[in-house]
Image (cartoon, helix red, strand yellow):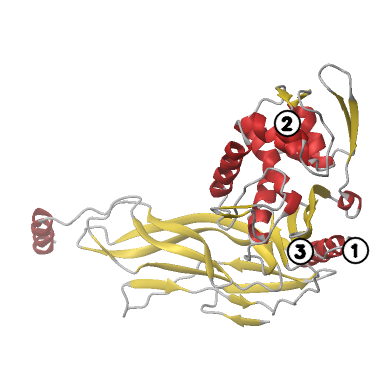
Amino acid sequence: MHILSADCNTMVVSRKSENCMRYFYFRKKAVCVLLAFVLCVVGTAAVFGEEKPTLSLNALSACLLDGESGRVLYGKNETEQRAMASTTKIMTLIVTLENADLNDVVTISKNAARQPDVQLNVNTGEQYILGDLLYSLMLESHNDVAVAIAEHVGGSVEGFAALMNAKAAELGMENTYFITPNGLDAQDENGRHSTTAVDLARLAAYAVKNEQFVAITNTKSYSFREVNGKRSFTVNNKNLFLSMMNGAIGVKTGFTGEAGYCFVGAVRQDGRTFVSVVLGSGWPPNKTYKWKDTRTLMQFGLEHYFPETIYDEEFYETIPVSGSPKETVDIRAKGSLSMLLSEYDSVRVYYEYKKELTAPVYANELVGNIYVTLNDEIVDIIEIRTVEEAKKDTFIRYIEDVIKIFLF
């Protein structure tokens, strides 16, 4: 570990946990006036992280995301577009939860009933409660049910796809395009039904913050009946990951000939949420690769990333003012920032503010910023502002000062 310090009031302390080195950053108020510049820059210590290892993954694309901040903690071809199979149904469920009444009655169309496997095997004209169908959608990944839901919520498959793509845009999924609600391989004049590992991770991180979503995807078994009571069903959760790791909270498997085996997972432990995505994690008969890849990603996150306070301070300083009877004004900034950090991260906090002000100065005037950078990218900007005003000197005030000199 290399430490670069710009002032004597900076202290960096490191300590080892069982599995990794964790860094703590403490900073006292620092003052540095550089007369040759308009701005005063005060540096703090920078910790240059170790080189991140390359994980052994079968997946063609993979991503590990901090579920709270949305920060990518590990990636492998994470921005390459690929088919996503039934992981599509994560978006199908979210769009339904946010746009429909789960007590609605869904009538099965001929189009929905003729969808290929995997199927619930619903029949044309049958009716079901929408909320019941969501368990069939997520626990056993039924393609006929996905289309029935889409037609009910969106008016048509195309209308529902428009809702899916609008939600994707809202979530910043810049390289994702939805055509189907079930994830079957598809292509139209606008592109291929596809996503990226990082886009899918962003979607999942958003989804697991929805309590209804988690309740449905974590259900082990669910029974329901057709509205007229003639047929009854029991669906069982096919997500084996739920029993593989402590704190697992879903979310969805997938497979098509084009996509290969895919899985989106999430884990909550010790106040941390990790979201993982593997796309193209083997083809038959390598059905278990996706579980191995997911465990590798999750264990990497759990062993190396811990919540740390990067910045937590109330900063005060006094700077001179020219052209005012008030010779100085106080400036202030207050902020805090915490996130998951590892020994692979480089952190810097530095201050940049004007070394001198010219009257008039107004209270709450912006005079500089505190910049927090993580791996050379700015992650937070805290404004430095004046606490008080300083009025401009006047001619009358100048005369009064001259008189005082002669009188006293």
Q: Residue at x 89, y 23 (%)?
A: 231
Between discs 2 and 1, the one toward the N terminus: 2
x, y percent for residue 227: 81, 19
Of residues 310 and 297, the one nearer the viewer is: 297
Amino acid type at circle 2 is Lys
- Give the residue at mark 2: 110
Mark 2 touches mark 1? (CB < 8 Å): no
Q: Which mark is residue 280?
A: 3
- Give the residue at mark 1: 285
Nearer the camera: disc 3 or disc 1: 1
Number of numbered labels in the structure image? 3
x, y percent for residue 389: 29, 51
Q: Residue at x 11, y 59 (%)?
A: 398
Q: Is residue 48 left or right of residue 408?
A: right
Amino acid type at circle 3 is Gly
How many residues crowd around disc 1 within 10 Å: few (fewer than 14), some, or many (20 or more)?
A: few
Q: Secondary structure at mark 1?
A: loop
